[in-house]
Amino acid sequence: MTAAEEILFALKNLAIPYDLVRHEEVHTIEDCAWAQEQLGALVCKNLFLTPRNQSAFYLLVVRPDAVFRTADISGQIGSSRLSFGPSERLMAFLRVAPGAISPLGLLFDRQRRVQLLVDERLKLEERLAFHPNDNTQTLALKGADFFEKFLPAAAHPPRFVRLT
């Protein structure tokens, strides 16, 4: 079973309804505009981050138009300066490659090696959209279901951060 199939199976088992669209492979948040319009949901930008010594790993989930500075996020979480994490760790921890990063992949991080950081403004969104670890698909679900059902089931409580 692929990671995407496992994620969809988990959503079904958690009784979390979702809408799914299939599309050509996308690589940027701009490429996701069509899916965002089709689903009527905010497609989130997801970044895999780590300090230089790779002592911790973070998944940062933000609005697609968010401007963030790693120094701001580092300061809020008490970390040394963050940069992008290595793709081999991303695959090992979340079973996903760069370009398809998704908080839905947290289902696979049973050892909780990745800490979830979420733009606090996403709490206000009615519907959120993510790739199910496959950038040829995008799914949308209620924001409340993501925060109140999915994340507890994945055992990854969010830490909310403020972006300027």
Image (cartoon, rainbow, N blue to C red):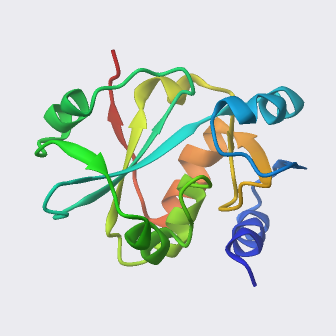
Check the picture and name the quadrant holding the C terminus: top left
Q: Number of labelled discs?
A: 0
Q: Residue 142 in the image: x percent, y percent?
A: 71, 39
| Horizontal relation, residue 12 to residue 157: left or right | right
Q: Position of residue 43 (x, y in %)?
A: 67, 34
Residue sticking out furthest to the top: 164
Percent position of residue 6, x then y: 71, 75
Q: Is residue 55 above or below residue 121?
A: below
Where residue 134 sits in the image (x, y, percent)?
71, 61
The residue under the point 73% across, 35% down is 32
Residue toward you, 98 or 8:
98
| Nearest the eye: 108 or 14 | 108
Asked whether, in this view, residue 143 is left or right of residue 34, the answer is: left
> In percent of the image, x 19 and y 30: which residue is there?
71
Q: Is 9 in front, or is 59?
A: 59
| Quadrant (top left/top right/bottom left/bottom right) for the N terminus | bottom right
What residue sits 41% from the left and 20% below the top? 67
The image shows residue 84, relative to residue 122, as above or below, that is below
Is 150 displayed left or right of 36 in the figure?
left
Where on the picture, by quarter, is residue 97? bottom right
Residue 34, by quadrant, is: top right
